[in-house]
Image: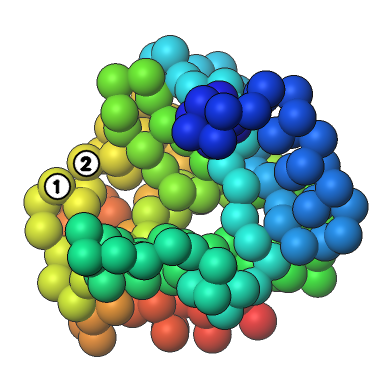
C-alpha cells in the first residue's frame, strides 16, 4: 500500500480506505502473511487480489515493457487463490489461507494452515519447472519440514522434485473438489 500511495502521491491511509471499500464491495480480498513460528523476518502487509481474474486483466495497465507471461502469472495466481478460498469455505472451514514472503525475498504464494492441514503452494505460469521455481518451497521446507509442498504449473506432467509435488494447474484445481 505504501508503494501505491507513493506512486499516486496520496496518503497511505487514504489508499487503505479505498481498498477497504473495494473489499466491502467484494471486488477484492486480502490474504494475510503466514507468521506462525516464523524463523525468518517476513513482510507484514497482506497480498491483495481482485475477486475475478478477468477484472484484473481488464484493469491492469499494459505497455511495451510488460511481458504477457508476467501478466498471465499474476492472473493465474489470482485464479488459484479464488479456488482455494472457495474450497476452504466448502470443505475446510477450519483452515486459513496465507502467503509468506521473507525480507530476503523468498516467497510462497499460498500457505494453507489449519487442523490437520499444512500446505505450501507455489504457482508458476510456465510449462517447464526450473530449479529457481522451487527456491521458495525449499526454503519453506527447511523452516517447516512437516508441511506438504506443492508447485502448481502450466505443464502436463506430475513430478516429485526434492520432496515437492509438481502438479499441472488444471489437475490441482480439479482435485480441490
Q: Are marks 1 and 2 in contact (CB under 8 Å)?
A: yes
In this view, the residue in front, 95 or 55, is: 55
Q: Position of residue 67 (x, y in %)?
A: 22, 65
Q: Which mark is residue 157?
A: none
Q: Position of residue 94 (x, y in %)?
A: 80, 49
Q: Position of residue 118 (x, y in %)?
A: 56, 45
**What's the residue at 51%, 49% (across, down)?**
110
The image quadrant where one finds the C terminus is: bottom right
Q: Position of residue 129 (x, y in %)?
A: 16, 64
The image quadrant where one finds the N terminus is: top right
In this view, the residue in front, 72 or 135, is: 72
> Which residue is most to the left?
131
Residue 84 visible to an observer of this rendering:
no
SS class, disc 2: helix
Residue occupied by mark 1: 132
Give the CA separation, mark 1 to mark 2: 5 Å
Note whether 95 is above or below 63 in the view shown: above
Residue 146 visible to an observer of this rendering:
yes
**What's the residue at 43%, 84% (across, down)?**
170
Residue occupied by mark 2: 135
**What's the residue at 11%, 58% (across, down)?**
130
SS class, disc 1: helix
Amino acid at each position: 500500500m505504501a508503494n501505491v500511495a507513493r506512486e499516486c502521491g496520496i496518503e497511505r491511509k487514504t489508499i487503505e480506505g479505498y481498498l477497504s471499500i473495494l473489499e466491502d464491495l467484494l471486488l477484492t480480498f486480502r490474504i494475510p502473511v503466514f507468521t506462525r513460528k516464523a524463523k525468518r523476518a517476513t513482510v507484514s502487509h497482506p497480498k491483495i487480489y481482485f475477486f475475478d481474474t478477468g477484472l484484473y486483466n481488464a484493469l491492469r495497465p499494459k505497455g511495451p515493457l510488460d511481458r504477457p507471461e508476467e501478466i498471465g502469472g499474476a492472473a493465474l495466481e489470482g485464479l488459484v487463490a479464488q479456488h482455494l478460498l472457495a474450497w476452504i469455505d466448502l470443505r475446510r472451514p477450519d483452515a486459513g489461507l496465507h502467503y509468506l514472503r521473507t525480507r530476503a525475498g523468498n516467497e510462497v504464494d499460498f500457505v494453507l494452515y489449519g487442523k490437520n492441514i499444512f500446505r505450501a503452494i507455489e504457482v508458476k505460469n510456465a510449462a517447464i519447472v526450473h530449479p529457481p521455481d522451487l527456491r521458495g518451497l525449499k526454503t519453506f521446507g527447511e523452516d517447516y519440514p512437516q508441511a506438504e509442498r506443492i508447485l502448481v504449473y502450466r505443464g502436463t506432467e506430475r513430478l516429485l522434485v526434492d520432496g515437492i509435488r509438481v502438479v499441472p494447474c488444471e489437475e490441482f484445481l480439479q482435485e480441490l473438489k
